[in-house]
């Protein structure tokens, strides 16, 4: 389907521009007019412009925080008794992101033409996940769309907070490691060669640490391009491997088995999965349908395959906890809580309890990880710098001895 860039003004006179896919200029112009826009120009993008646009959209996107904001706003206004369309109109006028505003206008138009809210949301999978659409659909069936949206906003906020903590915990050590590597490379490439000239000209016997350091420095100076090629080739091969289903599974499995970091990611994934299942089952979705939705939204391929197996076993009449226990990734406490939920018929509440428990666990682990990693990484980098300093100072001491003689 071709992509077009449009320029238009809304009914308040504000200038708008964007790029969307459409079957043709006339159809896009009609859709824009239906949304209340006054069309100024429409131009079809060429192949190069479309590729640039796709890259830009990936980088720009729509922040999940903005989706949470409009979800909470819509739930609040519906709870106050305001009809659906005026609520959506008000949200569209307040949204600062033009792409999101355009999507909301499309949703308004679809709802006016007779589609349900969940059907209209389902046409924008890049913004509203299967989980989101299914929960809204159940809310429509039970007449509790406002409560459903409030639950979605609350669950989404908790998930965002949890992801933010995990991201912060993983980003901090990565920054320290990269900064340390850059400092060491600078010392080896710029500083050490100046000392090596002094040592060689003085004909001083070099200790083993100094020989090792000079060899590394010489290699970096002479073959930095080879090292760069190897790094780029490795990253490219890893990315290509990660794009395959089997490759992504093995990478996710490797990450989950890492010490400390793997445990942190596993706990956050269990919390995300449990919260999604709690949200769906509490809204009235059957367990099998809830597992099918979560399978599509979980992201982690290891967990995805576990959920596929669980769904298959539950379909055959087995209990939920049996395949979870056999996977080897779920702690005994989680299995026991979910088993109790199955026995008492309170599985939705147990899912929520597991999610809340692991929220606290992840927060505690992030705090501990940050406090432990900082001194550990500083100790490692200090050891490397100390080795470099010692390798430089030992020949200097030998030089002093030669001059004294």
Image (tube, helix red, strand yellow):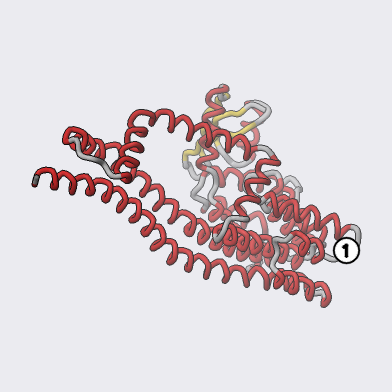
| The furthest residue to the front | 405
| Quadrant of the snapshot with the C terminus | top left
Image spot of residue 332 (x, y percent): 72, 70
Front-most of residues 343 and 286: 343
Question: Is 12 placed left or right of 338 in the picture?
Answer: left
- Give the number of callouts: 1
Tell me: residue 237, above or below residue 49. below
Front-most of residues 310 and 102: 310
* Residue, disc 1: 318
Image spot of residue 349 (x, y percent): 73, 73
Image spot of residue 281 (x, y percent): 76, 65
Question: Is 371 placed left or right of 135 in the picture?
Answer: left
| The furthest residue to the bottom | 344
| Quadrant of the snapshot with the N terminus | top right
Among the 4 quarters of the image, the one containing residue 66: bottom right
Tell me: residue 25, above or below residue 67. above
Residue pictured at 58% horizontal, 37% vertical:
239
Among the 4 quarters of the image, the one containing residue 243: top right
Residue pictured at 20% horizontal, 39% vertical:
204
Front-most of residues 8 and 310: 310
Question: Is 325 placed left or right of 356 in the picture?
Answer: right
Residue at disc 1, secondary structure: loop
Residue pictured at 76% horizontal, 56% vertical:
307
Image spot of residue 313 (x, y percent): 86, 58
Can the viewer see residue 333?
yes
């Amino acid at each position: 389907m071709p992509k077009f860039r449009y320029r238009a003004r809304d009914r308040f006179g504000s200038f708008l521009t964007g790029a969307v896919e459409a079957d043709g200029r006339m159809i896009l112009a009609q859709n824009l007019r239906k949304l209340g826009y006054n069309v100024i120009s429409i131009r079809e993008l060429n192949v190069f412009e479309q590729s640039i646009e796709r890259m830009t959209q990936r980088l720009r996107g729509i922040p999940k925080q903005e989706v949470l904001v409009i979800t909470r706003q819509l739930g609040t206004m519906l709870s106050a008794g305001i009809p659906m369309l005026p609520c959506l109109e008000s949200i569209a006028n307040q949204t600062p992101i033009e792409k999101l505003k355009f999507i909301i206008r499309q949703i308004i138009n679809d709802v006016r033409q007779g589609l349900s809210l969940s059907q209209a949301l389902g046409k924008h999978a890049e913004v509203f996940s299967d989980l989101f659409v299914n929960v809204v659909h159940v809310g429509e069936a039970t007449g509790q769309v406002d409560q459903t949206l409030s639950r979605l906003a609350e669950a989404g906020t908790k998930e965002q907070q949890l992801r933010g903590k995990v991201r912060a915990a993983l980003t901090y050590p990565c920054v320290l490691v990269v900064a340390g590597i850059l400092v060491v490379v600078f010392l080896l490439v710029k500083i050490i060669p100046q000392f090596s000239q002094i040592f060689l000209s003085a004909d001083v016997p070099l200790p083993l640490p100094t020989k090792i350091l000079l060899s590394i420095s010489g290699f970096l100076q002479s073959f930095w391009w080879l090292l760069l090629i190897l790094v780029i080739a490795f990253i490219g091969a890893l990315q290509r491997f990660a794009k395959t289903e089997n490759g992504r599974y093995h990478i996710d499995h490797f990450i989950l088995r890492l010490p400390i970091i793997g445990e942190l990611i596993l706990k956050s994934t269990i919390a995300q999965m449990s919260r999604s299942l709690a949200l769906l089952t509490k809204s009235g979705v059957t367990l099998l349908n809830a597992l099918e939705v979560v399978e599509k939204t979980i992201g982690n391929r290891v967990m995805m395959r576990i959920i596929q197996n669980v769904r298959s076993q539950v379909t055959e009449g087995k209990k939920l906890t049996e395949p979870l226990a056999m996977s080897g990734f779920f702690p005994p406490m989680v299995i026991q809580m979910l088993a109790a939920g199955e026995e008492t018929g309170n599985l939705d509440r147990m899912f929520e309890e597991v999610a809340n428990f692991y929220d606290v666990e992840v927060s505690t682990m992030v705090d501990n990880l940050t406090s432990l990693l900082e001194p550990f990484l500083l100790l490692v980098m200090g050891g490397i710098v100390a080795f470099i300093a010692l390798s430089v100072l030992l020949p200097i001491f030998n030089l002093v001895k030669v001059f004294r003689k």
